[in-house]
Structure formats: C-alpha cells, structure tokens
Amino acid sequence: MSRFALIFVVIASATAVRASEPAGAPTPIAAEFKVRPIGHVKKSEDRTWIVLDKQYAPGLLGLDGFSHIHVIWWFDQNDTPQKRAVLQVHPRGDRNNPLTGVFACRAPVRPNLIALSLCKVLTVQDNMVEIDQTDAFDGTPVLDIKPYAPGIDSASDVRVPQWAGPAK
C-alpha cells in the first residue's frame, strides 16, 4: 500500500444529549472519523506544490481566483503514540517560553496531528497547486484545501500571549 493510500482514523470525543437525560446534560460518546488524504506536498529545488490525486482535480475549479489557501495536512513524520500523548510544551521549542497546553500553541505534537498552513497560491494547473511555501515536508499527506477569505478568516481585537507575538 502506498503511503498516500493510507486512511487516517481519528477517534474523537463528542457530546450528545440522550432523550432520557435532563436537557443540557452532555454525555460523552466516542466517534470515529475516517480521513483520507486528497494528495501530498511535493518539494523540488525551490518550488512547492500541492499535488492532488487525479480524482480530486475537478475540485480545484475556481481556486485560481484566490491569492491564498489554507492547506490542512497531517504531521505524518511526527505520528507516534508518545507524541500524541504530549499535552504541554514550551512553544516554538524554546524553554524560555512558558509551559503551555498544545491547544494554546501550534506545536507539532498533539492528540490529532492535523496541521494548518496559510499559503500563497502561485499557479493552479490540472491537479497541482503551486504555492510559495509551507512548513510541511516533501511527501506530507494533504487532507484538505480551503480558500482564504478575508473578513471570514480575519479577526479584530486580537490578543495573544507575549511569546506568541512576532519574532524579534
């Protein structure tokens, strides 16, 4: 089986209210989701592409009208039970930063190794999207692509901890 034919099974917690429970009483239930890669990252010299499996190429129609995309990918080279169990880190691998929960930073260790990169679109052709860059490695499985939408993907009155500000 090729690396890109893998099916990622994500086990997640969800809440549901049973009819026999009082209103507002959440009951944890287990849910299973199957996530299949739609393609992979291809890096060659100084160029980077998102290469979709041919069956998904029609889904790129109209994407060339957007300047930026969110690429959702899997931290496949970081996927071990031990790394999935890490829930607190020093952000950016810097011990000078305070110990922080993985949901309060962008650490590559987390229960579900889903990553998100905002990328500039250079070209869209056939089943390939050339982007300016991504921190994903060559061969990384891509789970989804979503266009960046100003106003929807922007926030006002943003607040972040001091360590999360721009690098000096």
Image: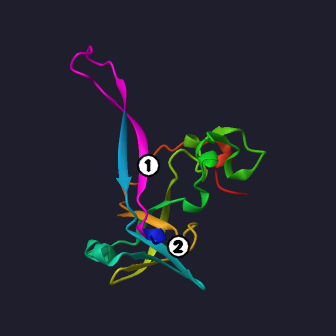
Which quarter of the picture shows residue 30?
top left
Mark 1 lies on a secondary structure that is loop
- Residue that appears at 36% across and 44% down: 32
Q: Tell whether label 1 touches label 2 (CB within 8 Å).
A: no
- Pick whichever, 134 or 79, lies toward us: 79
Against 93, residue 59 (above or below) is: below
* Residue interval drawn in magenta: 5-29
Image quarter where the N terminus lies is bottom left
Q: Is residue 75 visible?
A: yes
Q: Earlier in the sequence, mark 2 or mark 1?
A: 2
- Pick whichever, 113 or 72, lies toward us: 113
Task: Classify residue 134 as left or right of residue 123.
Answer: right
Against 129, residue 69 (above or below) is: above
Q: Which residue is mark 1?
A: 155
Label annotation for residue 49: none
Give the x, y percent position of residue 143: 41, 62
